[in-house]
Image: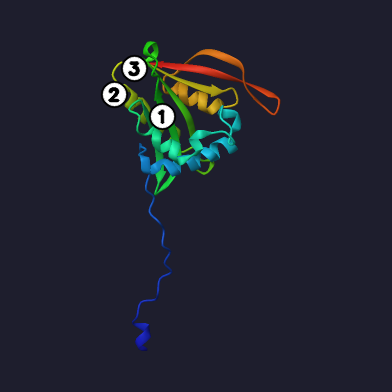
Amino acid sequence: MRADALTPPKRNTCRVRPYYPPMIRLLTPSDAPAFAELRRLMLRESPWAFSSSPETDRASDPEFVAARFASASQAIAGAFDDDRLLSAALLVRDDAPKRVHIANIYSVYTHPDARRRGLCRAVCSLLLETVRSWSGVEVVQISVSERAAEARALYESLGFTIWGVEPDALRIGGVSLAERHMLLRL
């Protein structure tokens, strides 16, 4: 018998990276560049879903975004896969004295490569949990484009209801788009 016959054959090995679910958490100032990068993508990829334009958007600037973290009346939730921000949403409490009972959710977006994984639901749920800890907030509002049926269904499943429709809310390339305004009573 040959000596190499006693040696077990080499196995074909494939290194598979184990799957770790995305980390859902509130963003910190160090996350500002990642949010600004995702913000630029959202404005290019889904212009009909946001009132801002890439040319004039302040939230595409990491310094502006980092400054938002200094405010106790704002929070940004995100879903991370390693260091890559895949999904995000912004929560802002109204600071007008007669409107401090209202908070708004803006800039809800998931990277196209990460859709249909429940990330928008997760970041919105974290923001709703966060806003419930803010004393005096009783209403959360969100708006959704008429083109975003899946987003509308998500918001409705989280308890939001439509209170009004704004016709001609946005115009892109001469095309008029309506927005549905929704609210959730806490």
**Quick one: SS at disc 3?**
loop
Mark 1, residue position: 124
User: Residue at 41% of width from left, 62% of height from top?
Assistant: 15
- Residue 93: image quadrant is top left
The disc at residue 25 is: none
Q: Mark 2 or 1 closer to N-term? A: 1
Left or right: residue 16 compared with residue 38: left
The amino acid marked with disc number 3 is: Val
Where is residue 148 shown, x and y percent of the image?
56, 27
Where is residue 121 shown, x and y percent of the image?
42, 31
The disc at residue 137 is: 3
The amino acid marked with disc number 1 is: Cys
Q: Characterize the local packing of mark 1: few (<14), some (14-19) or many (20 or more) Cα atoms within 10 angstroms.
A: many
The answer to whether residue 59 shows anywhere in this view is yes
- Residue 169: image quadrant is top right
User: What's the CA distance linking mark 1 and mark 3?
Assistant: 16 Å
Mark 2, residue position: 133
Where is residue 119 shown, x and y percent of the image?
43, 36
Left or right: residue 112 compared with residue 8: right
